[in-house]
Image (tube, rainbow, N blue to C red):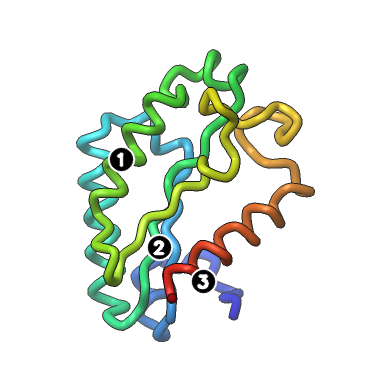
Amino acid sequence: LSDQGFQGMLLSELLAQREYTCVYINLGLNGAGYPIDSLMRAYQELLIAVVRTQPLSTIVLQGVMTVSRTWAERVPYCAPENLRQINRRIQRFADNYRIYYVDPNQQFADNQGFLPKEMTADGCHLYAKYTHLWSDWICRVVEELDT
């Protein structure tokens, strides 16, 4: 099921329109540059709003995906250590009953915590040809949560 035609609509309005089985929350890299405490307060407010408007849905919190070494060197707040800290804080919101945390870096990071350079042109976004791996991975992980 895909939502279309919601340009200009607030998330709260979209969530109030129908009941969802599952809601995915994926914090982007831009948020990683904010002070972590204020970022987590905003994240928690978002999560509370989703729980209130979707009381029967499963909520999947996805950790922030890592970036290439080159990108992390240019954008210090994207260093693997910072992203791991953010992801640990996001993971604390999971209750493993209704709210789950999944970490894309288990699938996409190399052994040093970076996105392999062959998977990205700009250092922070997957090439389109790899997005199916991301989609397949998250579907598999969520399916495992249901069992």
Residue toward you, 131 or 143: 143
- Residue that badge 1 annotates: 88
What is the spatial separation of the Cα atoms under label 1 and label 2, in whole angstroms?
15 Å
Which quadrant would the C terminus be assigned to in this image?
bottom left
Amino acid type, callout 1: Arg
- Residue that badge 2 annotates: 60
Horizontal and vertical percent position of residue 133: 68, 53
Q: Earlier in the sequence, mark 3 or mark 2?
A: 2
Amino acid type, callout 2: Val
What is the spatial separation of the Cα atoms under label 3 and label 2, in whole angstroms?
11 Å
Determine which of the numbered discs, if any, sits on residue 143 in the image: 3
Position above or below: 141 against 112: below
121 relative to 112 in the view: left or right = right
Q: Earlier in the sequence, mark 1 or mark 2?
A: 2
The residue drawn where x is 47% and y is 37% is 29
The local secondary structure at tag 1 comes to: helix
